[in-house]
């Protein structure tokens, strides 16, 4: 039995990174898997991962206690002084350390995010095999970010990308070999669940996002209203997908606002007040005819099932994962473009023109690419 530690998923309320974690868990059932979890979320994480008997949660010590002391410990840990001894012991007794940060190792999220995502790698013993799961990396800005990333990359056995767009931001890292695979969520197996709401035969999943307002959309709930209106006009029902439920960006609140403000008495628009496990969201999405989502991983779930998808994009990851791999079945529209609703119309009108054989072949190709990462472990 191999021991695997997963970092980069410090809580499971982001069902995107949880999708990657669940994919590893499901495909490595005979291995002991430890997931690093923020103390503020660990009880919640225990419930969400409780269906997997081979998983345990390890609290991250520098996310609790005295902040000044932790700053001191974090800094001197990078110089080789061995603070957090019990944490290091668990880390160094493992065979693999797998990073599933997704797109958090990027200037888009800032130096602080890069530091905390990479810190477990930076202090890991040299005998543990460090793997970057297929993800989006970069861009990086400034001396500190580039130094942290280079130090982490130097310790890694494999650095995997889920899309080729990231290579544009990795020109300063030409000494490192990057392998092109596919997002681990393509491997995720759906977990069936029962709802007290009914998903009709013709339903479009609409993935809302609390992030949209941060990318230049003045009235995000109104934008989603217009998208839903177009779905209803064309005879579809709508399932609101709330994929992230952190205090910093709670999609459940966005879905509730949209439903209560615009569709309160319209039974064609359904929502849930729960952020399900990633594998459960995949099951719900599998019941739909298509998806339009401002979060990327609901789109990955759909594409792996050969369900047409439109990703309302806000950075380069969607270009690589959705459009370049899956066009015309996977499409993108910039979230703040004036013609975003035109692209929604175009997408909905093309749902009945899908070549299912070609689509399934593309899905299987990406599933096989993601499986190549698992093959490095099992």
Image (cartoon, grey):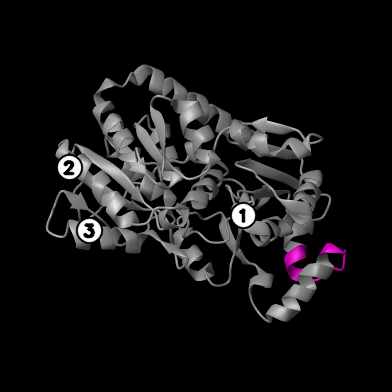
- Residue to which mark 3 is pinned: 259
116 lies above or below 154: below
Q: Is residue 301 magenta?
A: no
Identified at 59% across, 45% down, the residue is 30
Identified at 30% across, 39% down, the residue is 341
Q: Nearer the viewer, mark 2 or mark 1?
A: 2
Of residues 85 and 303, the one drawn nearer to the viewer in this rendering: 303
| Quadrant in the picture for the C terminus | top right
Identified at 31% across, 22% down, the residue is 354
Q: Position of residue 328 (x, y in %)?
A: 39, 24
Dot placed on the residue nearer the N-terminal end, 2 or 1: 1
Using the rendered image of the protein, determine whether residue 148 is visible from the camera's viewpoint.
no
Label 2: state its secondary structure: helix
Dot placed on the residue nearer the N-terminal end, 3 or 2: 2
Q: Position of residue 312 (x, y in %)?
A: 40, 42
Label 1: state its secondary structure: loop
The quadrant holding residue 174 is top right
How far apart are the alpha carbons under marks 1 and 3? 33 Å
Q: Which residues are magenta?
A: 78-88
The quadrant holding residue 265 is bottom left
129 lies above or below 330: below
The quadrant holding residue 57 is bottom right
Identified at 20% across, 45% down, the residue is 229
- Find residue 227 and name its label: none
Using the rendered image of the protein, determine whether residue 171 is visible from the camera's viewpoint.
yes
- Residue to which mark 2 is pinned: 232
User: How many labels sit on residues?
Assistant: 3
- Residue to which mark 1 is pinned: 8
How far apart are the alpha carbons under marks 3 and 2? 14 Å
Q: Position of residue 81 (x, y in %)?
A: 87, 68
219 relative position to 15: left or right: left
């Amino acid at each position: 039995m191999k021991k695997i530690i997963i970092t980069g998923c410090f809580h499971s309320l982001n069902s995107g990174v949880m999708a990657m974690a669940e994919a590893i868990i499901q495909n490595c059932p005979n291995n002991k898997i430890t997931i690093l979890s923020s103390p503020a979320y660990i009880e919640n994480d225990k419930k969400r991962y409780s269906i997997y008997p081979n998983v345990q949660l390890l609290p991250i010590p520098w996310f609790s206690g005295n902040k000044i002391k932790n700053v001191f410990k974090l800094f001197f840990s990078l110089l080789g002084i061995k603070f957090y001894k019990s944490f290091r012991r668990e880390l160094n007794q493992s065979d693999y350390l797998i990073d599933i940060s997704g797109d958090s190792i990027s200037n888009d999220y800032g130096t602080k995010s890069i530091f905390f995502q990479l810190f477990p790698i930076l202090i890991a013993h040299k005998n543990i095999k460090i793997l970057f799961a297929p993800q989006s990396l970069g861009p990086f800005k400034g001396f500190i970010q580039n130094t942290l990333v280079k130090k982490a990359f130097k310790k890694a056995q494999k650095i995997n990308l889920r899309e080729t767009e990231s290579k544009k931001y990795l020109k300063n890292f030409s000494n490192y070999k990057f392998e092109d695979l596919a997002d681990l969520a393509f491997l995720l197996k759906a977990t069936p669940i029962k709802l007290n709401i009914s998903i009709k035969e013709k339903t479009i999943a609409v993935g809302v996002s609390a992030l949209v307002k941060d990318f230049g959309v003045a009235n995000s709930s109104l934008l989603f209203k217009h998208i839903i209106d177009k779905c209803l006009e064309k005879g579809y029902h709508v399932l609101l997908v709330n994929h992230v439920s952190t205090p910093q960006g709670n999609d459940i609140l966005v879905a509730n606002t949209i439903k209560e403000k615009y569709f309160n008495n319209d039974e064609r628009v359904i929502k849930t007040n729960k952020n399900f496990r990633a594998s459960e969201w995949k099951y719900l999405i599998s019941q739909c005819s298509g998806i339009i989502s401002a979060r990327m991983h609901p789109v990955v779930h759909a594409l792996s099932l050969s369900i047409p998808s439109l990703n309302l994009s806000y950075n380069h990851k969607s270009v690589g994962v959705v459009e370049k791999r899956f066009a015309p079945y996977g499409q993108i529209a910039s979230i703040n473009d004036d013609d975003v609703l035109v692209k929604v119309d175009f997408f909905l009108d093309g749902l009945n023109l899908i070549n299912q054989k070609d689509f399934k072949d593309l899905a299987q190709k990406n599933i096989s690419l993601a499986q190549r990462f698992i093959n490095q472990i099992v």
